Image (tube, rainbow, N blue to C red):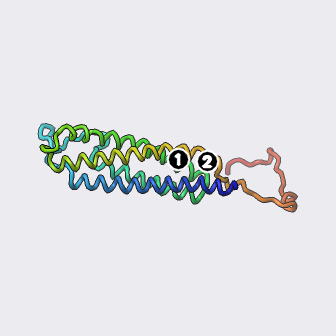
Amino acid sequence: MLSSSIGLRFYSIALCGLLFCLLGVGGIILSAVELFQGRPSVYHYDTSRGGLAVENPLWPSAGRGIWVGLVFIATGLVGILASRERTPPALMGFTALVGTSTILSFYLIMTSIIPVKYDAKASDETRPQWETIELTISSLLIAVGSAGCILGILGTFCGILFSNICADQRENIDLSGDDVEKISIIPPERYRYGI
């Protein structure tokens, strides 16, 4: 009963990893479509500044789904590997990446709201095709970011809760009666520290 419960818990980590991989692929595809079919580069050019106008100087929002998608895929792969390995370091690495993915999901949502806010002001008759594509893709990226946030929060809680269940393989030693007699206890004054 206990081993099936542990197996089910690690199955949920693998499922979380698989969903992160799928969200990452979806974000990359949506962002690639937006880059090639969305806003033409002419509309990004700002002659008063002598170059491209960027909405966010820390991380440009063009291609935002690609970068977040790559982190999602890495998180998903680590989740799948952690569910197979079942060691505390693998599970802690997965939990750290899930936390990072959750923060990046918020960023994806925030940078996708900006185009939706401006593109939704125009009526459907006066809106050019690239603006319609940008509005649709940005709305779908908001959905990907929201799903990533929810999945990230659940994955973080699962990683924190399940880390107590992982078996530390260094401490799993089966000792028989003969082996116990061979163990010698070294007094602390004989310890050698360093090299």
Give the SS element for disc 2: loop
Left or right of 126 in this view: 97: right
Nearer to us in this view, 49 or 66: 66
Side (left or right) of 64 relative to 101: left
Mark 2 belongs to which amino acid? Ser
Q: Nearer the viewer, residue 159 or 141?
A: 141
| Position of residue 64 in the picture relative to residue 193 (left or right) | left
Dots 2 and 1: beta carbons under 8 Å?
Answer: yes
**Upstream in sequence: badge 2 or badge 1:** 1
**The N terminus - image quarter:** bottom right
**Relative to 41, residue 48 above or below:** above
Residue 129 in the image: x percent, y percent?
A: 16, 50
- Mark 2–mark 1 distance (CA, rounded to whole Å): 9 Å
Residue located beneath label 1 in the image: 95
Question: Dot 2 corresponds to which residue?
Answer: 163
- Categorize mark 2 by other alpha carbons within 10 Å: few (<14), some (14-19), many (20+): some
The secondary element bearing badge 1 is classed as helix
Q: Residues within 10 Å of mark 1 (few under 14, many from 20)?
A: many
Closer to us: 133 or 17 = 133
Instruction: Determine whether 133 is above or below 118 in the image.
Output: below
User: Residue drawn at (22%, 55%), measured in percent from left and top?
Assistant: 36
Of the residues shown, which amino acid type is indicated by label 1? Thr
Residue 28 drawn at (x, y percent)? 33, 55
Residue 52 at what x, y percent from top left? 18, 44
Relative side of 154 to 119, left or right: right
**Which residue is at a point 72% across and 56% down the rendered structure image?**
172
